[in-house]
Amino acid sequence: MLIKNIGILAGIVPEGVLRKEGASQGIVDCLENAWLLIEDGRISAFGPMSTCPSVIPSSPSVIPSEVEESLDARGGMILPGFCDSHTHIVYAGSRDGEFLDKINGLSYEEIAARGGGILNSSDLLNATSEDSLFDQSMARVKEMMAKGTVAMEIKSGYGLNPKGEMKMLRVIDRIRKTVPVAVKSTFLGAHAIGRGYSHEDYVKAVIDMIPEAAKLADFVDVFCDEGFFTVEDTDRILSAANGLLKPKIHANELAVSGGVQVGVKHGALSVDHLERTTDAEIEALRGSETMPTMLPGSSFFLGIPYGRAKDYINAGLGVALASDYNPGSSPSGDMRFVMALGCIRMRLTPAQAFNAVTLNSAYAMGVSDDLGSITRGKKASLILTQPGWTLTKLPYLHHTPFISKVFVEGKEL
Ligand code: NIG
Ligand code: FE
């Protein structure tokens, strides 16, 4: 399929660039008035309209003799679909009761301490059938896809016992096999202490779950934070998962936890949240393979600080942004809103925020060799906007409908 008359083709990245760090995070390469060719679900070529195959049939050598289908973008922008590297969308029921508690002044920690929070979701999940859990979760997956998310990571962590955790991982696997978008699965057994366990017994139980979990999951995660799991717990769990599951860590949401450092030590793909940061975290991340990932939707919803994304970028690091879509701290999977919060509340430029929700978030879930940018050979999982949209308008007009079509591996959703 050939897409013609693209107003702005945004997010062009050379082959082999898997993340953007430092000054390069502020650069989004674009082509105005462009065409793009999709073959076998992948981007096979693109260029300015003056070289468009249907305009000059014999010009670029990469063009196949026959273009099966052509689409007029009518000046709409094409961008890589959003990659959401941190979600908890497999959950049962709702926590709207806690929303009222929150409005009445209780903090996230206070709600959790009263047996609400993650344990509330765990009770609901353990009382829900696998089929119903799948159906409830699929509604959120479809909502995210319609909003332009073409890759999503999904965590377990509401089972909090072997049966419940495996049920969640099976549901994630079923989602992966059902939807066209890329899905990565993370075992987050260490999300809270499961009911009926002592702290120590539960850490041991999580370690025991790892071999079974590793049959379905790609990554392991630990909520390394005040009142949840310590650095020592995290170290033990990550050591047990070594060679089986690459880590992605929840760190520094509620306190400066040491989670960043232990994550980097174990070669984590990402360390996430980072609402609380000292310069030591930035130092620890320098020169590492770990992507600092911030979740402004949870800062917004919980009324806690926003991560110091600009300081990270100014220190030469890359930053990813993800939704954290979950019932307790971020009940939204809208990645354009995440991008808007990045700009409005974290003072990222639209270009920095764009790279944070595309290439860098793809990196943070291990798919940036295939997704996250306009690059020859990558999957054609793209958003076509309505006419007249620009990079700056995406976060600026943050709730105006902007999507004309979403393509996943070249097929319209
Ligand atoms: O990333 N912080 C820990 N886990 C989730 C919240 C989960 C919940 O409250 O249900 C988070 O914010
Ligand atoms: Fe989370």
Image: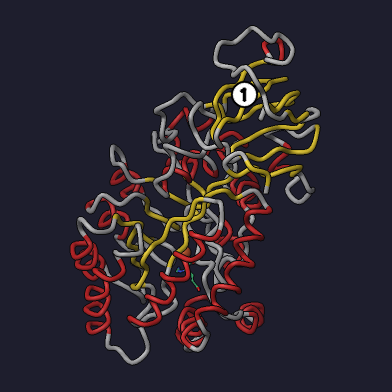
Q: Is residue 344 placed above or below 173 in the rendered structure?
A: above
> Label 1's element?
strand
Tell me, yes or no, if residue 336 can be seen here: yes
Q: Tell me if 356 is positioned left or right of 236 in this view.
A: right
Q: Is residue 166 placed above or below 2 in the rendered structure?
A: below
Residue with the mark numbered 1: 30
Respond yes or no on whether mark 1 lies under 8 Å from ligand 2. Answer: no
Q: Amino acid at mark 1?
A: Cys
In x, y percent, where is residue 325? 56, 63
In x, y percent, where is residue 355? 53, 37
Q: Residue at x 57, y 30 (%)?
A: 39
Q: Tell me if 405 is positioned left or right of 217 in this view.
A: right
The single residue placed furthest to the bottom in the displayed view is 196
Q: Tell me if 285 is positioned left or right of 103 in this view.
A: left
In x, y percent, where is residue 105? 61, 79
Tell me, yes or no, if residue 345 can be seen here: no
Q: How many marks?
A: 1
Q: Residue at x 72, y 43 (%)?
A: 405
Q: Residue at x 52, y 42 (%)?
A: 356
Q: Is residue 86 placed above or below 12 in the rendered structure?
A: below
Disc 1 crowd rating (10 Å Cα; few below 14, some 14-19, many 20+) is some
In x, y percent, where is residue 88? 50, 66
